[in-house]
Amino acid sequence: MTADGSNPLISVQPNALKFVFELEKPSFCDLKVVNNTEHYVAFKVKTTSPKKYFVRPNTGVVQPWDSSVIRVTLQAPREYPPDMQCKDKFLLQSTIVPPNTDVDDLPADTFNKESTKEIQECKLKVFYVTPSSRGNSEDEGFKSYSDQAPDSNSAVQRLKDERDAAVRQTLQLQQELDFLKRRRHRRNDTGFSLKFALIVGLIGIMVGLLLNFSFSSSLSSPAAVPTVETTTSPVEPSTTEGIETPL
């Protein structure tokens, strides 16, 4: 029964949130929300310390006679609270919505108390337990929820699917980043090879021009003509003895 005497639209198991408190380590607690009516019921979770907790989903719609699982995660604490006492509280609001309503179709004023619709509230306290006393501090409501294997398995499977999707997206982004890095590296290598080829080509042209110039110079120089030394022997005057010259 609710505070105004009406039957509750939804029931929550367990009736309190218990977190295993360890420094620098997050902890979570699952809440099972059961729709006790033949109507579609929307719910919303609020807390007095929104920066300390992560609630997923914090808003949802439960079909008639169906249930939903809410995971509340305590972010990694940095210091111990005084006497391990927690003053945080949670508030679970619920109201009837039209059939086949989806969570994305909920109006902004769905849980506004000023509207004429009935809004029920369920308050939940928060308790911190140490790892050593965890087994002894769990009450029957908490234990009974842990025995709900089908609902728990479906929630775990849904969380695993979401985690796998996030991992696949991360791997895809990493592959795209590696591809861009390799593509940029190939571009740098191509630029270096072109520059090297141009330099080698210029050197080859210069060497060819030098060789051509030296070869042309060697052809244009006059060939040495060998000189032949001729010796002339002196002609001795002939003597004509006994020969008379005619008058």
Image (tube, grey):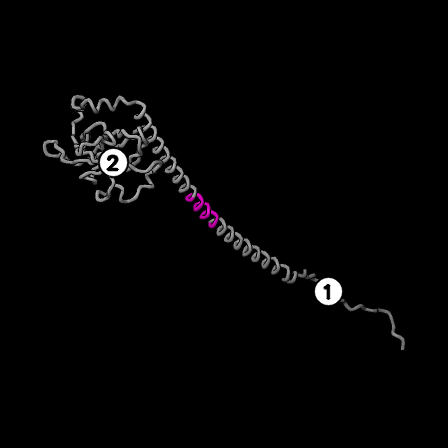
In this orientation, which residue lies closer to the viewer: 230 or 71?
71
* Residue 43 inside the magenta-drawn segment: no
How far apart, in angstroms, are the residues tagged by discs 2 and 1?
145 Å
Q: Does residue 117 lie above or below 149 as drawn?
A: below
Which residue is found at the position 22% from the left and 30% from the top? 7
Q: Which residues are magenta?
A: 180-191
Q: Secondary structure at mark 1?
A: loop
* Residue 185 inside the magenta-drawn segment: yes
* Residue at the outermost bottom position: 247
Q: Viewed as shown, does residue 184 lie left or right of 220? A: left
Q: Secondary structure at mark 2?
A: strand
Numbered marks: total: 2
Q: Nearer the viewer, mark 2 or mark 1?
A: 2
Which residue is found at the position 22% from the left and 33% from the top? 26
The C terminus: image quadrant: bottom right
* x, y percent for residue 54: 24, 37
- Looking at the image, is mark 2 or mark 1 earlier in the sequence? 2
Which amino acid type is shown beneath numbered disc 2?
Ser
Q: Does residue 237 lie above or below 91 as drawn?
A: below
Circle 1 residue: 232
In this orientation, which residue lies closer to the viewer: 20 or 15?
15
Circle 2 residue: 94
Which residue is found at the position 46% from the left and 49% from the top? 192
* x, y percent for residue 226: 68, 60
* Residue at the outermost left position: 83
Which amino acid type is shown beneath numbered disc 1?
Thr
Q: Most prominent secondary structure in the magenta stretch?
A: helix
Residue 132 occupies quadrant: top left
Q: Viewed as shown, does residue 188 lie left or right of 78? A: right
Q: Does residue 45 lie above or below 218 as drawn?
A: above
Is the Cβ of the residue at disc 2 closer than 8 Å to that at disc 1?
Answer: no
